Image (cartoon, rainbow, N blue to C red):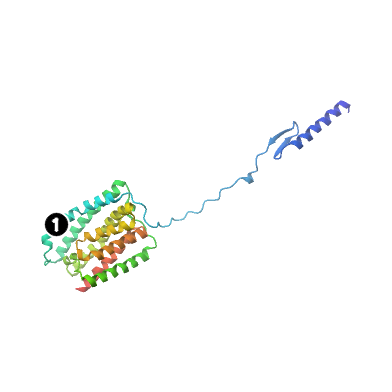
Amino acid sequence: MRYSERTRVVARKEITITTDRQAPRGRKTDRRDGYAAPVPPPFASEEVAPPPPPLTSAPAPVGLPQAGWNWHHAALGTLVGFGPTLVLYFVAGDSQSEPVTDVSAATAFALLLNSLMLYAWQAGSAWFFSLRIRGEGLVAWGFRRPTKAFFWTIPLALICVYAIAYFHDVIVHPEQQEILTFFPRTPSGVVLLVLLAVVAAPLFEELFFRGFVFRGLANSWGWPAGAAITAIVFGAAHLQLSVFLPLFALGFALAWVYQRTGSIWTSIALHAIFNGISVTVWALAG
């Protein structure tokens, strides 16, 4: 090998050694021209998202969500819903003061039909001033599955209401509710009373008072104030001042179990059980 060729070989080796030493870490060197190409990071360093958890059924909600209507709608709906009842009450005020003498299954059946018509009117008023204007479904009234508190709130509420009713009876000695005087203590009379007091009244009254009125008042002023005002309206709607206090206690208890379990089925069940016990005592007393 001649001198000039040996010099070019040595110079090429020096360039290769120099570029290898100066190449930054993480780069590889092209030995042909000394260019250091970047090396992408390894895939092992990338974070991998954990797998999603398995789907499970959502727990039942506690309490009630905020209603879409307020006390203005509740007041208007109550005025419209009880307008016909107030008119009939004041028009027939003189005849109601006289004792009922002709008690039969026919008069009891007529009272049942009249009550169902009034209940339907009130339900329509509640629907218009709540669900219709807000475009919501029956779940907004609380028609959904209750929480497990259903099994202990109802017995506790019954104990409290009956305790208040007992001391009220001992002190005041009120007369029986006037509606009972329209039903004979016969099998047909008892069946008609059960249909009215244990089936129709719990469903329609809870729909109106708790599902509509209480929800609107609670949305504006909180559930304790809403429960108290609704209980006053509930007691006054029965048009018998002598039993106002027990009815107020029952109305407040119905709002409490409704709020606690988040379902109107709880207050319907409590109302039906309370009326069922009252009807049983009335039937056995005769």
Say which of 92 and 196 sits in front: 92
- Secondary structure beneath disc 1? helix
Looking at the image, is 113 positioned above or below residue 128?
A: below
Q: Is residue 265 left or right of residue 103?
A: right
Q: Is residue 55 left or right of residue 262?
A: right
Residue 276 picture quarter = bottom left
Say which of 2 and 93 sits in front: 93
Say which of 236 and 126 sits in front: 236
Q: Position of residue 101 (x, y in %)?
A: 11, 67
Residue reaching furthest to the right: 2
Query: Label 1: how many residues lie within 10 Å, few (<14), some (14-19) or many (20+)?
Result: few
Residue 190 picture quarter = bottom left
Q: Position of residue 283 (x, y in %)?
A: 21, 71
- Quadrant that contains the N terminus: top right
Name the amino acid type tagged 1: Phe
The residue where tag 1 is placed is 90
Residue 167 picture quarter = bottom left
Q: Residue at x 21, y 73 (%)?
A: 285
Q: Position of residue 65 (x, y in %)?
A: 37, 53
- Quadrant that contains the C terminus: bottom left
Taking the image as drawn, is residue 206 in sight?
Answer: no
Q: Position of residue 9 (x, y in %)?
A: 83, 30
Total number of numbered labels?
1
Taking the image as drawn, is residue 248 in sight?
Answer: yes
Q: Residue at x 85, y 28 (%)?
A: 7
